[in-house]
Amino acid sequence: MVKPSTAQVWDWLDQVPDPEIPVISVVDLGIIRDVQWQDDTLEVTLTPTYSGCPATSVIELSVDAALRDHGVETLTLKRQIAPPWTTAWLSDKGRAKLETYGIAPPNPAGGPTRCPRCQSENLKRISQFGSTPCKAQWQCRDCLEPFDYFKCI
């Protein structure tokens, strides 16, 4: 097999969905930190969203399977925990996909700026806990729809 370029590998990884929020890729999520060739071995560095994230093993399996499906035979996955992942690593494309999917993207000011469904800014927090540890539950006071907010880390 001819070694694919690292740009090609990034494109392939951009097709691997996050298992908890499948509308965004692991690249959009910002957890793929580096892709490089070490001689004939492809080395992919991942940073989990937090050290106890239960999805990390599934993500690693998905990345491994995706690259092997594209013909990469020799592969090393490195887990890097420092520096820790932050929501600032989410891509703009990923933030837009979250909102289109109905999840308010993280906001450094501490809460969603608008309802992902009707765009109203008339919001209230229902619970600081959501469907996963990285989300909180909010509601729009205008359209009355509850929605997840991706917490800022």
Image (cartoon, rainbow, N blue to C red):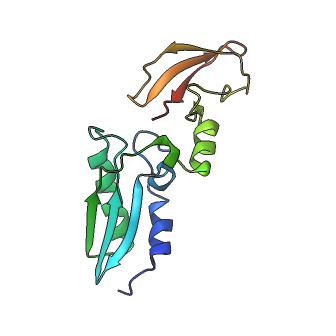
Q: Quadrant of the C terminus?
A: top left
- The foreground one among 5 and 106 is 106
Q: Residue placed at 30% from the left, 46% from the top?
A: 56
How many labels, in total?
0
- The foreground one among 58 and 119 is 119
Q: Quadrant of the N terminus?
A: bottom left
The image shows residue 61 at horizontal and vertical percentages of 29, 55
Q: Residue placed at 44% from the left, 43% from the top?
A: 86
The image shows residue 7 at horizontal and vertical percentages of 50, 73
Q: Residue placed at 35% from the left, 51% from the top?
A: 47
On the question of residue 24 being in view, the answer is no
Q: Does residue 40 lie above or below 113 as drawn?
A: below
Q: Is residue 114 left or right of residue 131?
A: right
The image shows residue 106 at horizontal and vertical percentages of 55, 34
Q: Does residue 120 lie above or below 13 as drawn?
A: above
Q: Given the current orientation, which residue lies at the most extreme bottom position?
A: 2
The image shows residue 51 at horizontal and vertical percentages of 28, 41
Q: Residue placed at 40% from the left, 64% from the top?
A: 34
Q: Does residue 12 lie above or below 39 as drawn?
A: above
Indicate the quadrant where residue 39 lies.
bottom left
On the question of residue 36 being in view, the answer is yes
